[in-house]
Amino acid sequence: MEMPQRVSIRYKDTTYNTNEIRLKTFRLAFQLWEEQTKTRKTELYEFIQTCLKQIDRQDRFMISLLFVELADLIRDSSLDRGMKEVLIKTSFREFACALTDFEDNSK
């Protein structure tokens, strides 16, 4: 399944297209390694929330695809196994929290 190319969002006064959303997501996920002691509401959480609010319902699947791509990228990296596991778990936790909170707020 391909990412929709027409998607764009605004976050902190900057516009992001699909590729920039992908890069920002990956950068923020890797940044979590340094922030892993923090609980929810990291910048990755805020960015995913912003994306979900601005992306049409039919295109929201792209957020899930980003995290599948991210998991593959982490898995194929040269990081040690323990670091890979923590990074994937932390990233998906933030993603799940953002998605759950978004769905709860939209009801």
Image: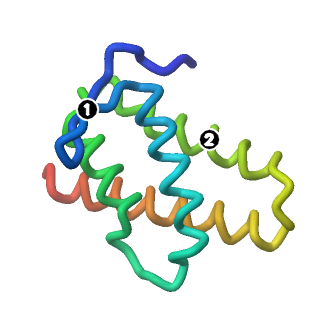
Q: Earlier in the sequence, mark 2 or mark 1?
A: 1
Q: Position of residue 60 (x, y in %)?
A: 35, 33
Residue 60 falls left or right of residue 62: left
Up/down of 61 relative to 72, above or below: above
Which of the 4 image quarters holds residue 54? top left
Residue 68: give its label. Answer: 2
Q: Residue at x 62, y 45 (%)?
A: 70
* Distance between the alpha carbons at the discs numbered 2 and 1: 23 Å
Up/down of 101 relative to 3, above or below: below
Residue 61 falls left or right of residue 29: left
Disc 1 secondary structure class: strand
Q: Residue at x 51, y 76 (%)?
A: 35
Up/down of 72 relative to 96, above or below: above
Please tell me how crowded label 1 is: few (under 14), some (14-19), or many (20+) other residues with Cα within 10 Å.
few
Q: Amino acid at mark 2?
A: Val
Question: Residue tagged by mark 1?
Answer: 15
Q: Position of residue 73 (x, y in %)?
A: 72, 44
Residue 44 falls left or right of residue 88: left
How is colour applied across the structure in the image?
rainbow
Residue 5: give its label. Answer: none
Q: Residue at x 37, y 68 (%)?
A: 42
Please tell me how crowded label 2 is: few (under 14), some (14-19), or many (20+) other residues with Cα within 10 Å.
few
Up/down of 50 relative to 43, above or below: above
Q: Which of labels 2 and 1 is toward the front?
A: 1
Frontmost residue, 43 versus 65: 43
Which of the 4 image quarters holds residue 84? bottom right
Q: Quadrant of the N terminus?
A: top right
Q: Position of residue 49 (x, y in %)?
A: 28, 51
Q: Position of residue 88 (x, y in %)?
A: 65, 60
Q: Residue at x 60, y 70 (%)?
A: 33
Q: Amino acid at mark 1?
A: Thr
